[in-house]
């Protein structure tokens, strides 16, 4: 289905996201936090019990070097699973811990920025919270500039929790619908992907204003002029929007859209081509200097190796990454990346 014929369906799709009770399948979801002066990149290593690494971890790497050696490790509870990774403006790390003891439950944990554990001993948790609203498997996690925490669930529901959340809490706002990737900017505006139609796999981007409520409608919707299957979103300090994915010709790319983009929009820059070495991007993040970090897989499927690629702020076209970090971590369906 071509973009010119799907405007009405697109608007309907954006509206559906704000209506409770609607759901749809979701793709691997981006976890996006815009940060200042990114010097570290973090990857969740969440192999569950029975795998070669039974302790869930957040593994840190230098964001300014191509070294594959890790610089820090955060350990989760033994035999549980880490889902998601995010950082706040102080560099504290967030993740969702999936309990595998008896019954499945989910806890959002915050760890201090300087945490670096050895062995398999569980790292000290600064605070944590649970919610009965997390009633499906989480597939996304991010934090805005005010510390509000966003969790995306399988099926497209986005939950926003207050910055001070601890213990058992309820979300401050819930959007239930058909989102498959999300990002927030430092002002708390929320960006989510919605399908262009219900019969193809192309996406548009719906934008919700800071302080949105559960009943809010999108402020605007961005429809890529070149159809794009979006796997991840990010927003830079100026409000420009970054989307990773593949176009109709299966070309892998990072497309950049202007901060004020609305309606049918042409990307201002597109990073694509063999020289980029991109295979199957599943995460994208941008720091305040405009450097672009892409989480990639060497095989393009679950089971491949996690590779982090960094592109210069002005990168466009068929250009090589400014650095590539080839990790020893295995890419899984909920592997996540964060930078700070």
Image (cartoon, grey):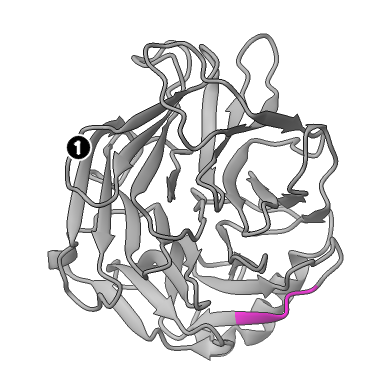
Above or below residue 283? Residue 211 is: below
- In the image, taking residue 151 as reference, residue 115 lies left or right, namely left
Q: Residue at x 33, y 66 (%)?
A: 291
- In the image, taking residue 104 as reference, residue 302 lies left or right, namely left
Total marks in image: 1
- In the image, taking residue 120 as reference, residue 102 lies left or right, namely right
- Report x, y in % for residue 332: 40, 35
Q: Is residue 219 magenta?
A: yes
Above or below residue 203? Residue 223 is: below
- Report x, y in % for residue 199: 57, 67
Above or below residue 226? Residue 172 is: above
Residue 25 seen by the camera: yes
- What is the span of residues highlighted in magenta in the rendered image? 217-221
Report which residue position mark 1 lands on: 68
Q: Secondary structure at mark 1?
A: loop
- Report x, y in % for residue 286: 41, 63
Looking at the magenta stretch, what is its main secondary structure?
Answer: loop
**Mark 1 Cα-neighbour bin, 10 Å: few <14, some 14–19, many ≥20:** some
Res 169 quadrant in image: top right
- Report x, y in % for residue 97: 60, 27
């Amino acid at each position: 289905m071509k973009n010119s014929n799907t405007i009405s369906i697109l608007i309907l799709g954006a509206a559906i996201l704000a209506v409770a009770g609607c759901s749809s399948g979701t793709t691997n979801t981006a976890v996006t936090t815009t940060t200042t002066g990114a010097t570290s990149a973090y990857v969740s290593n969440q192999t569950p019990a029975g795998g070669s690494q039974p302790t869930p971890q957040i593994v840190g790497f230098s964001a300014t070097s191509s070294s594959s050696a890790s610089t820090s490790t955060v350990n989760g509870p033994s035999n549980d699973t880490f889902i998601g990774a995010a950082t706040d403006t102080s560099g504290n790390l967030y993740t969702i811990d999936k309990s595998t003891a008896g019954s499945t439950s989910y806890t959002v944990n915050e760890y201090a920025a300087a945490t670096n554990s050895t062995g398999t001993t569980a790292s000290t948790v600064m605070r944590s919270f649970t919610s009965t609203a997390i009633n499906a498997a989480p597939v996304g996690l991010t934090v805005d500039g005010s510390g509000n925490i966003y969790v995306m669930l399988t099926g497209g529901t986005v939950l926003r929790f207050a910055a001070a959340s601890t213990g058992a809490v309820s979300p401050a706002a819930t959007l239930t619908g058909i989102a498959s990737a999300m990002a927030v900017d430092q002002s708390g505006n929320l960006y989510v992907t919605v399908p262009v139609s219900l019969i193809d796999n192309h996406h548009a981007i719906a934008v919700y204003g800071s302080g949105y409520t559960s009943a809010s409608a999108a402020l605007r919707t961005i429809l890529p002029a070149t159809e794009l299957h979006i796997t991840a979103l990010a927003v830079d300090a100026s409000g420009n929007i970054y989307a990773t994915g593949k176009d109709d010709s299966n070309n892998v790319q990072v497309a950049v859209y202007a901060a004020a983009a609305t309606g049918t929009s042409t990307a201002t820059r597109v990073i694509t081509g063999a020289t980029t070495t991109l295979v199957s991007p599943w995460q994208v993040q941008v720091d305040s200097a405009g450097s672009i970090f892409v989480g990639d897989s060497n095989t393009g499927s679950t089971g491949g190796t996690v590779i982090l690629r960094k592109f210069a702020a002005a990168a466009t076209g068929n250009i090589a990454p400014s650095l590539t970090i080839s990790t020893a971590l295995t890419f899984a369906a909920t592997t996540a990346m964060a930078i700070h």
